[in-house]
Structure formats: structure tokens, C-alpha cells
Amino acid sequence: MPDQGSSPRPLVPESAPPIFEVSGLRKSYRLGAVTIEALRGVDLVVTRGEFVVVAGPSGCGKTTLFNLLGALDGPDSGRVRFEGSDLGRLTAAEKTLFLRRKIGFVFQSFNLIPVLTAYENVEYPLWIDGLGRAERQRRTEEVLASVGLAGRMRQRPDQLSGGERQRVALARGLVHDPRVILADEPTANLDSKTGAEIVELLARTNSLRGTTFLIATHDPAIIERSPRRVRLLDGRVVADELGGPSRPGGAR
Amino acid sequence: MKFAVIALRNLARSRRRTLLSLLIVAAGTIVILLTAGFIRFSFEGLREAIIHGGLGQIEVVPRSDIANRGSSAERPGLPGLKGWQELRNAIEATPHVLAAGGLVQFTGLLSKGERSAAVFAVAIEPDRERRMRFEVKLREGADLPDAAPSEGDEAVLLGTVLARNLGAGTGDVLTLMSLTADGTLNALDLRVVGLITTGLQDVDSRIVKMHLASAQRLLATREISSLIVGLDDTSRTPEVQAALERRLGGREPSLAVVDWKTRAPFYGQVESLYLGIFWFLGSVIFALVCLSTSNTLLMSVMERVREIGTLLAIGTSRAQVAAIVLLEALWLGVLGALAGDLLGIGIIAGINGLGIQMPPPPGATGGIELRLTTAPGDFAATIVLMLVILGVAATVPVWMSVRLRIAEALRHV
């Protein structure tokens, strides 16, 4: 049975080193005259290679948590450590390199660059990181093939279906071989069949590449098959459950 | 893939807006090109009219004359340049010199019967003036003959207004009185062979032009006031001036080598007036193009807030985002300026083809045909100018794009 306690102790799966160590994370926003407390003290530890679903209804703080994990925003208080170093202490240039090399994002509405082809969208992170042309081409073609888009590389986003766009976005998130993929509602804009295919792809990538996945969702299909489920409600972690399939793909 | 390519593709996204911006930049370019062409036409026309109307590109004159009477073109006085034929040979051996001609300027009283007028007399060598490609604008009769007139057969050209005032025409014999070098009053009978205009009414009412030999006879001298030097190309003036200064350096009396611009202060005034107008117009164009393109650039940034947030989230630095926005502006500048230059060439060809007659400028008596000219430098200058304008126009959009907060930008709808 899932732990329904109001402030569960952070779960630390044995053996693997932690990739994220989150403690006492608070963040509030001003929306007009109202202050919204999006996160009210979140503690979380994620180890390398995990596949974690962060579940909860809209407005529970999932996106805010992901923004803080990805150093896209800073907390009011509390701390996010990535592989032992405090993200709050990064300079602007270090933050850019962190985003460029350590993290891959997958967004709900894909957020592809509309003027770039599928190939160019995927190649982009390697290009801004200064990789040589041959190496870029090799990695871009490989990752596009791994998400099943080998034949759709020259298309621009508006010529692709929703599922194809999300595959391109995933390929863009993976191409630089990041430690972590932060996927915020990756299936919310897709029909259930396409959504299931994307989840399958995320799970397979996790098991094949060992990339750590954090997926924010309220899609029961994803939540059920995930080996670890962190439930957020009103800016707090209300449950952190292990169990279910050992691998989200269910293959092993 | 390059940021310049991304910027260009971004421009292609909203074609109508980009086209409008390009039109604004092109229009600004055309206005600048046409204005520069018109100003150059005015400068060149005025310059060549002054030079070939009798001023010449260079004057070699005793330094004492300049000290006593200033350096402007009209400088009547007793001639004081000795041994000038030898000096002339030296000058005419200088490269780019077409010829050099003796000049005597003096004032006198010209009479026809009971009517008299104070005149400004210019005595020249007609054959040398022809070699210097000077133009005599004859309204009636013929030019002065090349050969020095024999005594008692002196010829004169009258300004048209002066002739009217005196009631004189070609064939009339008039008497010119002036003071000789030793201070006695002398008179000479001159037959009017033609009526001339200088283009300036004020000058036409008092000018008489005669052969150098006639003036020397009247003034009882063998000297001249100065030597006028004509060049094959006005742009060679500084170089020939320097060469002459070197060549004539050790002579007595000490000689000044004066260029046409110094002798025509009027030209400098016209030039600064026109340049003032040009800069004013340029500033207006700058402000108009800058404000309107800045607005469209800002719109295109505001429409792409989430996209820029995404670029930042996947590791694009803020400087790189700034580069994309700036490059969009610079593309608009260079493409708009190129389009404007091409259209401008066509418009200028069209205007020149029409053969438009410009009304005579104040004080002048004849109109001139409008011929706009362009220089290769104009095109380069318009492109550079538009790049600068668009660079300035991009400052606010660039600033807006780099200060975006990523998390907020990603929430932007």
C-alpha cells in the first residue's frame, strides 16, 4: 500500500549514487495581488538511472519543481543538489553549460524550433556546444533512428504529427547524452495510443541508455507502470511509492 | 546551420511583416541615394561652372597680391607679375596641366556716347582659355579672336546686362578709361564683338572681357596679375597644387599657388548649406527607419517568447539569443538597403531619362538639366548606414529577449 503520510521521508534506493538531492524546497509566485505557494517544502532524492513519475493534479507544483530541478528558476528557500553540487551557486555561464550538457527537457507542447527541420532541431544542442560536423551528424542520425524517425529528418515541425514532434523533442533531449531527462507532461497533448508509444519509448531509452527520467504527469497509464511514483499535492510530497514493474517498460 | 540562417528563416516566417520592414528600409535607402545624387549634381555642376567659367582649377599669383587683396577670384588691381612667360612654360610642363593663361583684372569706366558704367574688366588669352576648355557663354556675336589685336583694332565682350544698360550691341565702339601703372588716366577704344553671360546677373551687369594685350596697352604695362592654370581633371587639383608649390618654391617674388575652392568662397558656403540639409534629412530618415523597424522587431520577439525560453532551456546562451535577434535586424538592413539601391538605380536612370530642366538658382540666368549621379561609395554607404540604423533599432528587442526569465517564458502562451 502506498504511504499516505503527510511528510514521507525521502526514499533513497540502495546502491546507486544520488543525482538529485532536494531539501526544503519552497517557491511562491505573485499572480496579480495573490501569492501562490507552488512548493511548500519539498524533499526528494533521485538516484542515477531511476525512472520516476511525479504525479499530481494540475497546479500541484509539478512544473515548478521541474523548473527548479532544471535550474530554469531559483527557489525562495531550500536547495537542489545535482551530483553533489548546489545548483543555486552556479554562475550564468555554468548554468548554460549545465543546461547544454547535463539536462534534457521534454515539454508538454514539444517546443520545437519551428524554423528548423527535425534533424536541425535535434542537432542544435550539439551545434551550440561546438561539436564537429561529422560527430554531430553521427549522433543526430543515430538518436533520430532510435526514436523511429530516420525517414522524417528533413521535415519541419509543422509537417510532423504530434507523436512525431514529441519523438523529435525526445531525440533533442537525448542527443547530447544528458544525465537526466525532465519530461513535463510529455503525453498530455497526444491521443492515448500515441501517448502510450511515447511512454514506451521513454521507458526503453531509460533501460537501454540508463538515462535518469523524471516525468511529471497525471496520466494514470504512465503512473501505473512506473517503478517509482512521487505524488505531489498542494506543493508538498504526499507519497513516495516504490514497486510495480521493476522496469517501466515491463520487459524485465 | 548558423545563427544567420536561423535569423533569416525567422524573417521568412511572417512574410508580410518582413516585406513591410524591407520596404521601409528600401525607401530610406532610396531617399538617401536620391538626395546624395542631387547634392552631388549640384556640387559638380556648380564646381565645373565656376572653374570652366574662367576661374580655372589653380591660380599662381604673387603672395603680396593675396596679402593686399585677399584670395577670392575677383581681385582687381595693378598687375605685378614679371617674367611670366618663362613661369608659364614651367607650369605648362607639369603633368595634368592643360595650359596656363595670363590674367589681368582691373576696374574702369566704360562709355557709349553719354552713357557710362563702372565695369570690372577681365583680360585673358583666348587661345589659352580654349586649351583650358573654358566655356564662353555667348549670347550674341563671336568670341574674342585668338591672336593679339593690333593697335587700334581692340575687341571686347560685354556682359548682357551691361550691354542693355549702355544700349550697346555688337559692332558698337565703346571707350574704356582706367588708371595706368604710373597713375595717369588712359583710354582705349574697343569694338564690341559679342555679348556674354556668366550665369550670374550681378556679374553680367559689370563684366567686360578683352584680350590680355589690349589691357596691357591700356594700363601701359607688360606684366600680368596672375596665371590661371587649367587641369585635365578637377580631382587632380591637390596633387598639381603640391607639384607647383615644389616647382615654384624658390622664385622671386614669392608666389602663392591657390586652388579654386579658396578663390570661390561662395562654393564653400553652398556646400555647407547643402551638407546641412543632407544631414538633417539623414537624421529624419534615421529616426523614421529606426522607430518603425524597432517596432516590428519587438513584435517578432514578443511573439516568440516561449520559443526563446526553449532556446535558453536547451543551453543557448543569452549572448547567442541576442545574436539571433540582432542578426534578424541586420538581415533587414542589408537586404532592404540592397533592394533600395537597386530600385534607386532604376529611379535615378528614369529621372535622368526625363531630362528635367531645373529652374535657375537665385541670381543665375539660365536653367540646368537635372542629372543625378551616383558613386559606388554611395551604395556601400547606404548599406553601412542601414546596418547601423537596424543595429540601433534592435537594441530594445535584444534587451527584451536577453532579460527573459526562462521559467516565465516557457509558461508564455
Image (spheres, coloured by chain):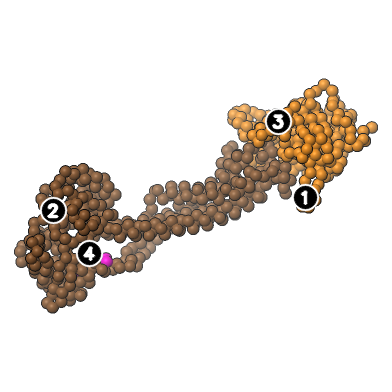
Chain colours: A orange, B brown
Magenta stretch bounds: B195-200
A222 vs B68: above or below: above
From mark 3 to mark 2, how far is it between C-alphas?
A: 90 Å
| Element type where label 4 sits in the image | strand
The chain that hosts pointer 1 is A
- Residue marked by disc 2: B81
Q: Where residue A167 appears, x then y in whole percent?
A: 73, 37
From mark 1 to mark 2, how far is it between C-alphas?
A: 92 Å
* Left or right relative to A25: residue B157: left
User: Which label sits in the foreground, 4 or 1?
Assistant: 1
- Residue marked by disc 1: A31
Give the residue at the far bottom of this rendering: B114
- Residue marked by disc 3: A102
User: Which label sits in the foreground, 3 or 1?
Assistant: 1
Q: Report the front residue among A6 and B307.
A: A6
* Left or right relative to B252: residue A147: right
The chain that hosts pointer 4 is B
Indicate the quadrant where residue A156 lies: top right
Whether labels 4 and 2 belong to a single chain: the reply is yes
As drawn, the label of residue B137 is 4
- Amino acid at the residue labelled 4: Lys
Label 3 neighbour load within 10 Å: few <14, some 14-19, many 20+: some
Q: Residue at x 77, y 40 (%)?
A: A76
B199 falls in the magenta region? yes
Q: Residue at x 25, y 52 (%)?
A: B259
Label 1 neighbour load within 10 Å: few <14, some 14-19, many 20+: few
The answer to whether mark 3 and mark 1 are in CB contact below 8 A is no
Give the residue at the far top of this rendering: A15
| Element type where label 1 sits in the image | strand
As drawn, the label of residue B160 is none
Give the residue at the far right of this rendering: A1
User: Which label sits in the foreground, 3 or 4?
Assistant: 3
